[in-house]
Image (cartoon, helix red, strand yellow):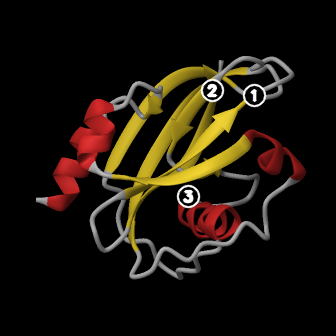
Amino acid sequence: MRRRLSARFLILNEAGHVLLFRFVHRKGPLAGQDFWATPGGGVEEGETLEQAAVRELMEETGLRRNDLGMEIARREVALQLPDGEHAISDERYFVVRVAADALSWESWTDFEREVMVEHRWWSRQDLLEAKATVWPENLVEMLDAVTV
C-alpha cells in the first residue's frame, strides 16, 4: 500500500473550540460514509510537508500563515481514499489559533463542495458527548496536550 503524507490542523478559536468539517459521501467508493474530521490534505508532488500545510490551510479555510510551527502529533492509519485507492495515511498535525471565526471556502474544489457539507466549532465536552463519528479518534487527547 502506498504511504500518503498529509498535513492536518487543530484550528482553535479563542474559546478553545476546534474546527471540524462534516464529510458526507453520497457516491463513489466512500458512499454512505458520514463523519466529522479536522481540515487538511495530502502533500503533492514536489512539495515539502510545510509547503503542503500552508497551502492546505489556505485552500480549506482561507486562513493564511507563512509558518505553522512544529507538528504536535502524528497518526498513521490505513484508509480508503475517495478514488477507491487504499493507502496508509501518515497524518501530521499542526495547531492553528485564530482570533476570529471568519473562514473562507473560495478555494474549495467541486469535490470538496460536494462532500464537506457542514462545519462547526466543537468544545472538548461536545467531543466527549459526540454520537457522530469524529476523526481522529484521539482528538480529545490531542487537544488536551496543546491546551494544558
Three-letter residue code for mark 1: His
The CA distance from mark 3 to mark 1 is: 27 Å
Look at the numbered discs 2 and 1 and tell me whether their residues touch, using CB distance below 8 Å: yes
At a point 70% along the width and 65% down the height, the residue shown is 59
Name the N-terminal-most of marks 2 and 1: 1
* Viewer-closest of 134 and 50: 134
* Cα distance in 3D space between marks 2 and 3: 27 Å
Coordinates of residue 6 in the picture (x, y in percent): 57, 46
73 with respect to 32 (left or right): left
Q: Distance between the residues labelled 2 and 1?
A: 6 Å
In the depicted view, which residue is nearer to us: 79 or 106? 106
Q: How crowded is mark 2: few (under 14 residues within 10 Å), some or many (20 or more)?
A: some
Q: Could you say which disc has been placed on residue 34 in the image?
A: 2
Location of residue 9 in the rendering, given as x and y in whole percent from the top left corner: 46, 56
Mark drawn on residue 49: 3
Residue 35 occupies quadrant = top right
For the C terminus, the image quarter is: bottom left
Q: Nearer the viewer, mark 2 or mark 3?
A: 2
Where does residue 11 sit, x and y in percent of width and height? 42, 62
User: Looking at the rendering, in which quadrant would you find the N terminus?
Assistant: top right
Q: Which mark sits nearer the N-terminus, 2 or 3?
A: 2
